[in-house]
Image (cartoon, helix red, strand yellow):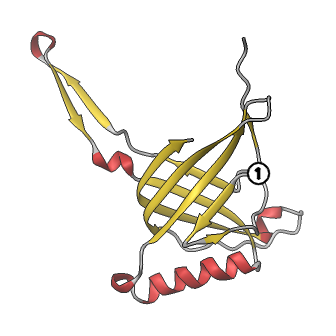
Amino acid sequence: MSVVSMSGDDTIILNSRILTGLGDGDVVKLTFETDIANVKTGKNGNSIFGLNTTGQQAGLELRVMRGSSDDVFLNSLLAKQTANFAGFALMFGQFIKKIGDGAGKIKKDTYILQGGVFVRPIDGVSNVEGNTDQSQSIYKLKFSYAARTVT
């Protein structure tokens, strides 16, 4: 029997706010940039294993419609972080993918995000050839921890 995985209608929540003013393409992109473990093999085939807890960090890229209420919300959080980094309340959230099995059953593939900060300011561009990126704000965040559950 074949396996079917149908996805769509995903949800991103930051600081209890459901973001709806998303743009085009990969509107939410969650990445893990560091390995969670290291292995080194030495003399006589002896192997050393090490847990790398920095591998729990996750990068989050959001493509938001420039000027939307979500852009205003995120930009105000970025301004708060910039104005008082030590006093900034770290962000939290969820990225929920809905996965259908083709027979009407849906599972939630959820990433729980904790300890988030913005890692870059928002780029700006003016393009006369119709590049749609000029009408989007691309936010780049990093979370200290992101756990995945499938229910």
Percent position of residue 143, x then y: 44, 60
Q: Is residue 94 above or below residue 91?
A: above
Between 149 and 117, the one lying in front of the other is: 149
Q: Return the residue found at the far left.
A: 43
Q: Return the residue found at the far bottom.
A: 83
Screen quadrant of the C terminus: top right
Percent position of residue 72, x then y: 68, 82
Left or right of 82? Residue 65 is: right
**Residue at which label 1 appears:** 9
Between 12 and 55, the one lying in front of the other is: 12
Percent position of residue 76, x then y: 58, 85
Q: Is residue 109 above or below residue 139?
A: above
Toward which corner of the image does residue 22 lie, by quadrant?
bottom right
What's under tag 1, amino acid-wise?
Asp
Left or right of 22? Residue 62 is: left
The residue shown at (59%, 55%) is: 95
The residue shown at (73%, 71%) is: 125
Between 73 and 35, the one lying in front of the other is: 73
Label 1 element class: loop
**Numbered-mark total:** 1
Percent position of residue 4, x then y: 74, 25
- The crowd level at tag 1 (other Cα within 10 Å; few <14, some 14-19, many 20+) is few
Toward which corner of the image does residue 13 lie, by quadrant?
bottom right
Q: Return the residue found at the far right.
A: 129
The residue shown at (69%, 77%) is: 71
